[in-house]
Image (cartoon, rainbow, N blue to C red):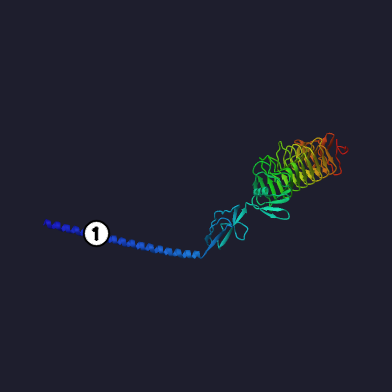
Amino acid sequence: MKKVITTTLLIFSMSFCMAQNIKQAAEEQRQRELQQQQEAETQRQQEIERQQQAVEAQQRAQNSHSVIFNSDGGSAVAAQIIYNGEKAKKPANPTKANNTFVEWRREGTSTAFDFNTPITSSTTLKAVWVSLAPTVTVTSEGNVIRGATLAAKLEWLDRNAESHNTYIVEVSANENIAPRTLEYRGAINITVVLIGDGTNRTIRLVSNGDMFTVRPNVTFVLDNNVTLHGHSQNSGNMVSVNGGIFKMNAGTTITGNQGGGGVYVSSGTFEMNGGTISNNGKSTNFNGGGVDNRSIFTMNGGIISGNTASDGGGVYNSGTFTMNNGTISGNTANNGGGVEHRYGTFTMNAGTVSGNNANRGGGVYVEHWRNFTMRGGTITNNTAMEYGGGVYGDITKTGGTITGYNSDPDNGNVVRDNNGVLARRGHAVFVNENRRKERSSGTHVDLSNNNTENWEQ
C-alpha cells in the first residue's frame, strides 16, 4: 500500500512539472511572437517615416534655392542650398592677395547683403574688396591715387614720385596714421594733393610728432573734405613746413592738437586760402597755437579760431606774415590773443581780427621796436586785461578799422580786468601812455609814429 502511494505521488509530481514546462514554453513562444510583431510594427513605422521623409525632401528640393558666393578672385567659398524662406549662413571671409575683404553684396547692388534676409530665389553674392595696392589714373589735373590705405598711398609715393608731377591722393575712409615726411630726394617740383572722396574724411595722428613734414621741392596741398586731427599728448604740429610749400584750401580743417600747434613754418611758405585751424596749442611755454610762422605765411582766407598759446594764440609771427583776408577769432594767449608779431613784418590788407583775449594786445601784440602795418581790414571786439584791447605796440595804420570801447562800448575793443573796464589803457591801440587810442579809428584815420595828431593822451 505504501509503495502504491509513493508511486502515485511521483507520477503526480512528474505530471505537474511537465505541465509547468509546457506552460512556460507556451508563454515564451507567445512573448517571441509578440516581440516579432512589435519589431515588424517598428519596421513598418520606420518605413512609413522614410517614405514620408523622402516625399518631404523631394517636395522641399523642388522649392529650394542656391546661394552662390562669387569671391571675385579670392579664395573659394562653397555654395549653399537654402529652402525657400530660410536664411543663408554667412561664410568665413575669403582671402585675396594684396586686398582686404569688405563685405558681400548681391550682384547689381551697392550695399552690403543682410544675412537675415529670407531667401526666396537663387542668389549670387559677390565679394567686395579694398585693394592694398594703390591704383593710379592719369588725368589732366594730375595722377589720381585711389584704393588702399592712406599709408600705402604715401608709401607708393615714396617709391614712385617723379619730378614735375602732381599726385592727387584720395582719402576714402577715416584713417589713423603715424608722422610722415613728404620728401623725395633726387626729385624736384612735386605736388601732393590730399582730398576726401566726396565726404569729409578725418585723419588722426596715432603717435607723437609732426603729422606731415613738408621738405624742399615739395608742395603739399590740403584740399577739400579733409580733417587733420591731433591729440592732447602730442608735442608736435599737424603740419610742419621745413623748406617746402604748404597750401590749405576751403573745406579742410586742422584741429584737436592741444599738446602742440596747428601749422609750424620754420622755412618755406604757408598759403592759407580757406579752411579752419582750430582748437590747437597749449597755454604754457608755447608760441602760435594756430600758426607759428618763422618764414613766410600768407593768409588769403579761412578761419583761425579757438587756439591757445602763451604768445600768439592764433598766429605767432617772426617772419613775413601778410593777411589779405580771412578771420582770426576767439583765440587766447598771454600776449597777442589773435596775433603776436615778434620779428619780421606783419602787413594786414584785409580780413578780421576779432573776439580774441590776452593780457596785452587782445587782437594784436607788437614786440618793442617792431612795426605792424595795417592797410585794411577790421580789428574789433578783442579784450586785453592790461593794455591794448585791439593792438599793443607800434603800428602804421593807413586804412582799415580798429574799434574802441569809448565810442563803441558794445562791440569795440576793450581793456577790462576782473573788476571792470580800465581807462587810459588803449582800448583801440596802446603804444605808451602818451600814444594811445581809446576811440574807434576808421579807414580814414591814420596812426603812426610820425603822425601825432590822431593819438589820444
Q: Quadrant of the N terminus?
A: bottom left
295 and 356: which one is in front? 295
Residue 251 point in image, percent of width and height: 72, 50
Residue 174 point in image, percent of width and height: 65, 49
Q: In the image as oriented, which residue stretches furthest toward the right?
A: 453
Q: Is residue 118 visible?
A: no
Please identify the quarter of the rendering in which residue 85 is found.
bottom right
Residue at 39% of width from left, 64% of height from top? 44
- Mark 1 Cα within 10 Å, few/some/many (few <14, many 20+)? few
314 and 78: which one is in front? 78
Secondary structure under the numbered disc 1 in the rendered image: helix
215 and 330: which one is in front? 215
Taking 141 as reference, is 400 above or below it? above
Q: Is residue 378 visible?
A: yes
Give the left or right position of residue 49, taking residue 36 as reference.
right
Residue to which mark 1 is pinned: 21
